[in-house]
Image (cartoon, rainbow, N blue to C red):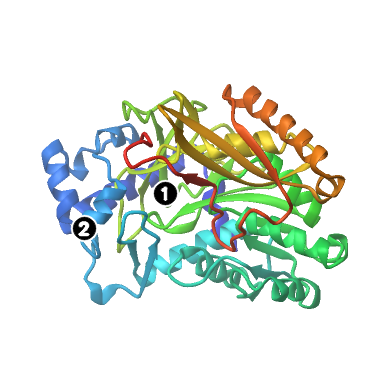
Amino acid sequence: MKDLTAAERLPRTELGRLQLGRLRRSVASAAERIPLHRERLRAAGLTARDLRSLDDLRRLPFTTKADFRDAYPYGLLAVPLDDVVRVHASSGTTGKPTVVAYTRRDLQTWSDVMARTLMMGGVGRSDVVQNAYGYGLFTGGLGFHYGAERVGAAVIPISGGFTERQLMALQDLGSTVLCSTPSYALYLAEALEEAGIAAKDLRLRVGFFGAEPWTEGMRAALEERLDLMALNIYGLSEVIGPGVSVECPERRGMHVAEDHFLPEVVDPATLEPVADGVPGELVFTTLTKEALPLIRYRTRDITTLDRTPCACGRTLARIGRITGRTDDMLIIRGVNVYPSQIEHALTQVAGVEPHYLLVVRRDGALDALEVRVEATASVAAAGPDAMRGAAALVKRRIHETIGLTADVTVVPPKAIERSAGKAKRVEDLRPRGGAPS
């Protein structure tokens, strides 16, 4: 697999030359074949030949989620439909899904970056990968599947759900690697405990968790309850799917596959690049995609960028943990609130589980936030007074974390709905137009 990992340790100057050459070719392809990019580049007075250094990236126009909706379904393709061999789609929150397409070479690139993702956790031919990401139009399941096959591992294509079957596979099939959303992994940990199965008696050693934001507190819970090393992954369908970035065992940020995806972090208000280490909106430009090249795609995800050397020896830049999205931020009585901030606060309180739901209401002229969180089994068994005591602790911790007083309801175990996919974290009951965007 040396051919797959060589780019991960290129000197930054050499990597930069590779990126610039690929950037020019990708922009030229987009300008020639995609009307939207051709018109925007013409309006900006730019051609691929004007890209003389990577600093010129900031001169290029942005692409947004709205462009996918406006061009639905195939208006952003740079190849004839005859050359497309795979179509995926992400769920749309306003109607039509976001459709993405792949050529045969795109699928090879995807398999390669997914192989590198798994190799970050030492996955190889001796491993059994239990893939509990959903298969189908969602990119997670098939992305991990082909990456695992690329490294020679045995794959259990179990998909999400079927919890009893998941436990059977963990025990009987000797799974060493678990791939799922972090919330579903925690649910599996609960199911193991209820079934009297000790995680230490399984062969699990590493898990790759993503598709939703999660915290260091959640990592600690997963590692303790599943007896594995939990690695954070990041990807999105528009860019390629999973495989965009992943943590190495140092766990000091997620290494971006920079030879394929060029990252920036910009100020969401000014859209100007920010310094490394400063939080902002993550932006990606694809460098090698054939079917659907993207120029400066605004992900809406909030993170930081770190180009300092990593102790693992990889020279690839790292993005920090996704702390929220510009479009899932709640504004409650003038305070900006991200679900990940609430999760962080909950993981600091003994007696509650990191299963929660944020309920936002309009009480008169003011917005009100209710946090519903599950009690641990021991607190629930101790009775109402213990549950009220846990609620008071949570309320204080949330106020210390975000400076906002929230109503807290501690509910019995399993009262919060579970999902094999992305967990639902917010229920906004404010009148239409009452939830600031």
Horizontal side, residue 420 vs residue 30: left or right: right
Q: Residue furthest front?
A: 364
The residue shown at (17%, 51%) is: 36
| Circle 2 residue | 71
Which quadrant holds the N terminus?
Answer: bottom right
Q: Amino acid at mark 2?
A: Ala
Horizontal side, residue 111 vs residue 177: left or right: left
The residue shown at (70%, 76%) is: 165
Q: Is residue 225 visible?
A: yes
How many numbered marks does the figure carry? 2
Q: Position of residue 59 (x, y in %)?
A: 25, 33
First in sequence: mark 2 vs mark 1? 2
Gap between marks 2 and 1 measured at Cα: 22 Å
Q: Is residue 304 visible?
A: no
| Circle 1 residue | 261
Horizontal side, residue 242 vs residue 84: left or right: right
Horizontal side, residue 286 vs residue 131: left or right: left
Which quadrant holds the C terminus?
Answer: top left
Classed neighbour count for the residue bearing mark 1: other residues with Cα under 10 Å, few (<14), some (14–19), many (≥20): many
In depth, the one of 287 and 338 nearer the eye is 338
Label 2: element kind: loop
Q: Position of residue 169 (x, y in %)?
A: 74, 75
Q: Amino acid at mark 1?
A: Phe
